[in-house]
Image (spheres, rainbow, N blue to C red):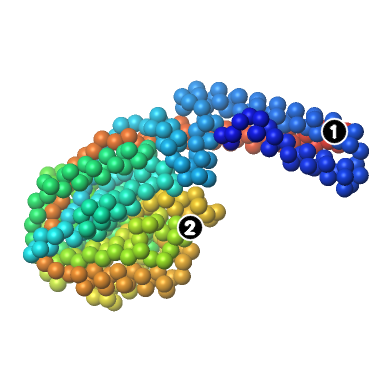
């Protein structure tokens, strides 16, 4: 796997067994004349096995994915150990397929000042696969660019998507950001929006609020576990509501997880039902007040927190005050969402929803069961709640009469794609299985050689 020369790799591979022989002779007094052949034969056996396995992996992988799996894995290690994602993203780009992503941006500005205050991006890209690869960092990148260029606060909650909709490179990230910024000049603002309606069915709940004819919907199965919602859900809901809204932006709140799960058909159906119920509720548009706030808590990637921190958009309509709370992380522990909403209501909000970005920047850093810590799993609960309450209080203090607008479009980008994802995972699975099966007899062979000669 190393990128050094073959001579260096061979040297490093032989250092440990050579030292074992040296210590056996100098410390334990074993006969060097018998250990030397043991070292030689064991080395030849091990290298023969290694080269045979690599040759098979290369042949099998090239047939299945079209290029060297060994080099791809080397690129993975380079990124994981050195944070250099260029090589790995070049391989992902070869695997990628062109995909149309739905993108909606909800924009808020002061009614008097006309200064942009906040922006919420809802899209069905998936923020993965891990660390700094592909679209893992896109939620934070978008926040940073909005802050730098527009002086506003951005929320990027998780849309309805799975890993097949991971963008393959930073180039694709830039394409989405560039296209959205270009479209902001076409936003038509209105001082009116509907109040938030919440619907549920015992398994799932959903909220809906409409800005400029675009419906903003949040969906959750909390306090029961939830994971990625299949993209087909968005297609079905959009089809069933076509003609009623200019666009329907669906948020997978991604706010309850106790362990590795796959969304059951019952939960998926319950989410669809709750979302459709919220969309069917007719509410008149009324004047709005909006307040925004952001804070970076004292937590790190290894704690499960992305650099985007905690962002809040507070919307008040006809005396109803609702908080959209977005945390840059990958899901959150069970019951934390409910505890946050209890604290938020005590501050003066009527309702709210806690959302996570599902950023995969936190993935692959710690040796946790999930490969990362969900929000709340690795930090003091009291400190986290205090941080969230502070941001919500700042959003309330920022409330003022505002105008809202929305733009919705489709952007063609390169994503990993479901077929490519399955091909890679099948290759990884079969290679791992073969290695595990072949490794045992190789170890036995070396042990037999050692016992026979010594």
Determine crowd level at label 2: few under 14, some 14-19, many 20+ residues with C-alpha closer than 10 A. some
Judge whether residue 118 can be spotted in this image.
yes
Determine crowd level at label 1: few under 14, some 14-19, many 20+ residues with C-alpha closer than 10 A. some
Residue nearest the observer in this picture, 126 or 171: 171
Which mark sits nearer the N-terminus, 1 or 2?
A: 1
Residue 330 location in percent, x, y? 40, 55
Residue under pointer 1: 36
Identify the secondary structure beneath mark 1. Answer: helix
Judge whether residue 162 can be spotted in this image.
no
Residue nearest the observer in this picture, 300 or 227: 300
Residue under pointer 2: 302
335 to 38, vertically: above or below: below
Residue nearest the observer in this picture, 117 or 446: 117
Residue 324 location in percent, x, y? 26, 62
Q: Quadrant of residue 23?
A: top right
Task: Identify the residue shown where x is 11% and y is 46%.
Answer: 186
Residue 227 location in percent, x, y? 39, 51
Task: Identify the residue shown where x is 68% and y is 37%.
Answer: 12
Q: Quadrant of residue 114?
A: bottom left
Question: Is 21 placed left or right of 324 in the picture?
Answer: right
Give me the disc on residue 93: none
């Amino acid at each position: 796997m190393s990128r050094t020369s073959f001579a260096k790799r061979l040297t490093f591979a032989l250092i440990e067994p050579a030292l074992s022989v040296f210590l056996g002779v100098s410390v334990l007094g074993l006969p060097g004349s018998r250990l030397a052949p043991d070292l030689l034969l064991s080395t030849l056996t091990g290298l023969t096995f290694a080269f045979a396995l690599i040759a098979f992996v290369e042949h099998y992988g090239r047939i299945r994915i079209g290029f060297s799996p060994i080099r791809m894995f080397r690129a993975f290690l380079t990124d994981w150990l050195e944070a250099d994602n260029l090589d790995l993203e070049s391989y992902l780009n070869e695997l990628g397929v062109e995909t149309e992503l739905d993108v909606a941006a909800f924009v808020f500005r002061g009614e008097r000042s006309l200064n942009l205050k906040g922006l919420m991006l809802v899209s069905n890209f998936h923020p993965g696969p891990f660390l700094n690869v592909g679209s893992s960092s896109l939620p934070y990148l978008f926040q940073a660019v909005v802050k730098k260029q527009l002086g506003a606060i951005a929320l990027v909650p998780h849309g309805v998507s799975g890993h097949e909709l991971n963008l393959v490179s930073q180039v694709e990230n830039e394409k989405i950001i560039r296209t959205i910024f270009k479209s902001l000049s076409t936003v038509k603002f209105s001082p009116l929006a509907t109040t938030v309606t919440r619907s549920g069915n015992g398994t799932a709940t959903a909220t809906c609020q409409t800005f400029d004819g675009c419906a903003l919907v949040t969906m959750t199965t909390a306090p029961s576990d939830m994971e990625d919602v299949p993209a087909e859900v968005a297609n079905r809901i959009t089809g069933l509501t076509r003609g009623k809204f200019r666009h329907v932006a669906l948020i997978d709140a991604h706010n309850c997880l106790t362990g590795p799960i796959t969304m059951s058909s019952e939960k998926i159906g319950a989410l669809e039902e709750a979302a459709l119920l919220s969309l069917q509720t007719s509410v008149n548009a009324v004047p709005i007040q909006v307040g925004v706030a952001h804070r970076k808590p004292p937590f790190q990637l290894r704690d499960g927190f992305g650099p985007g921190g905690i962002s809040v958009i507070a919307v008040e309509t006809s005396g109803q005050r609702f908080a959209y709370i977005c945390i840059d992380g990958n899901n959150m522990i069970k019951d934390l969402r409910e505890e946050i909403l209890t604290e938020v209501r005590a501050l003066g909000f009527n309702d709210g929803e806690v959302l996570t970005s599902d950023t995969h920047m936190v993935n692959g850093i710690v040796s946790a069961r999930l490969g990362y810590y969900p929000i709340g799993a690795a930090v003091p609960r009291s400190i986290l709640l205090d941080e969230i309450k502070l941001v919500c209080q700042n959003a309330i203090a920022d409330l003022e009469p505002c105008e809202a607008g929305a733009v919705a479009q489709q952007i063609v980008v390169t994503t990993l794609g479901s077929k490519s994802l399955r091909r890679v995972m099948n290759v990884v699975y079969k290679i791992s299985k073969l290695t595990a099966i072949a490794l045992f007899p190789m170890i036995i062979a070396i042990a037999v050689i050692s016992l026979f000669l010594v």
